[in-house]
Amino acid sequence: MKLADYGLNRDRGFLSSFNPPEVTLPHFLQPVRDMALALPRILPTGRVRAHLESLPTLDLSDFIKTSNDAERRIAMLHYSFMVQAYVWGEPEAPKALPACLAVPIWQLGEAISQPPLLPYSSYTLENWGRFDPDGPIDLSNIYTLQHFDGGLDEAWFILVHVAIEARAGELLDEATQLIDHLQEGDAARIEASLKAMSATWDDVNAIFDRMPDQCDPYVYFHRVRPWIHGWKNNPALGDGLVYDGVIETGGAPQAFRGQTGSQSSIVPAMDALLGVGHAADPLRTFLDELHAYRPPTHRRFIEDLRAKSSLRQFVEGASNKALTELYNESVMKLARFRTRHLEYAASYINKQSKGGAGNDPDVGTGGTPFMKY
């Protein structure tokens, strides 16, 4: 396996292989981009729907045929933020998305093989830039392109995830090398890769620990989280949302899960490498469902890693104490990352007071009873 075969590399991991600020869109999409980037100015008016309804209903068929993946994904970035703002930007959730948003995002979703609402890839993986284009992708050198209300807490929440994804690129690269080492039965190189992964996990977990530095739990719950909910299992939207003008739906409400860190491909990729299984319970069903929300190349990487990795079996059969300890260390550091996520879910969400429409502290942005999980 080679990262390049999946559009990935060691320095970026699952982040976009292109530099998002450098992607230009056709002239006819400029009003769309301008409207999306103006959301921090529009949202305080309380009339965001009136503004968004002024957009033209564009047929993006020709654009999709002639554009590259980067252009389609940046168009999806802007449309998906506007879709979320339309749904959650006023006190009562609407029954339908207007055609000016519904038609283009449906077309873009089909083009990139992801659901037509804000996915983790748009919220994080393609929503960053560097102040110094030649500098590192870390918290000292990155910024967000697209915002909802534009506050510091919102930007920090996104950027911590960007920095984690970049640092995790080394985990992915070592994972692909491990597949080769396993095929060769090279215990020394397997040990070296596991050592490198252990050190990288320390860095990843240290970045995650910085979330409270500039993202306050109260502000997150009331000013960041409301925008990223979906319309599946959301009490405010019942059966879902009608996508006006989208012929394929037959006018029926559509239910899609909201943006969640569980759509990141890091943890499932590591599960696949390490041979970590999950019990057949509702959480596993939810995690399996989220697989379709990832970019297609990320899905393929996880699936190929799972099919090719014999790491657990190799370690079990090697009778090598050092190798066993390193394998267990990787599992424990992955578990620490998961545990930290649960701790944040408790402090940033579950312990907060009741939110507005659709912002239930007992329901995750993906529409799950996450504390039970």
Image (spheres, helix red, strand yellow):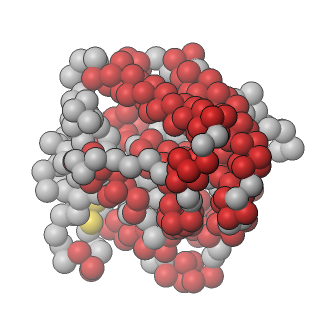
Instruction: Examine the image and state in which quarter residue 326 appears.
Output: top right
What residue is drawn where x is 41% and y is 24%?
Answer: 344
Residue placed furthest toward the front: 319
Q: Is residue 282 or residue 126 the one in the foreground?
A: 282
Q: Quadrant of residue 146?
A: top right
Q: Is residue 281 visible?
A: yes
Question: Which of 106 and 300 lies nearest the eye of the viewer?
Answer: 300
Residue closest to the far right: 134
- Seen in the picture, residue 356 relative to 308 is either above or below; the reply is above
Residue placed at 45% from the left, 25% from the top? 340
29 above or below 233?
Answer: below
Q: Residue 336 in the image: x percent, y percent?
A: 49, 28
The one of 188 and 36 positioned closer to us in this rendering = 188
Q: Residue 232: where, in percent of width, then height?
A: 23, 52
- Residue occupying image coordinates x 87% and y 44%: 134
x then y, percent, for residue 204? 62, 32
Residue 38 in view here: no
Q: The C terminus lies in which quarter of the figure?
A: top left
Is residue 24 shown above or below 367?
Answer: below
Residue 208 position in % (x across, y down): 56, 27
180 vs 237: above or below: below
Front residue of 113 and 106: 113
Which residue sits at x=36%, y=18%? 347
In the image, 257: left or right of 124? left
Left or right of 61 in this view: 218: left
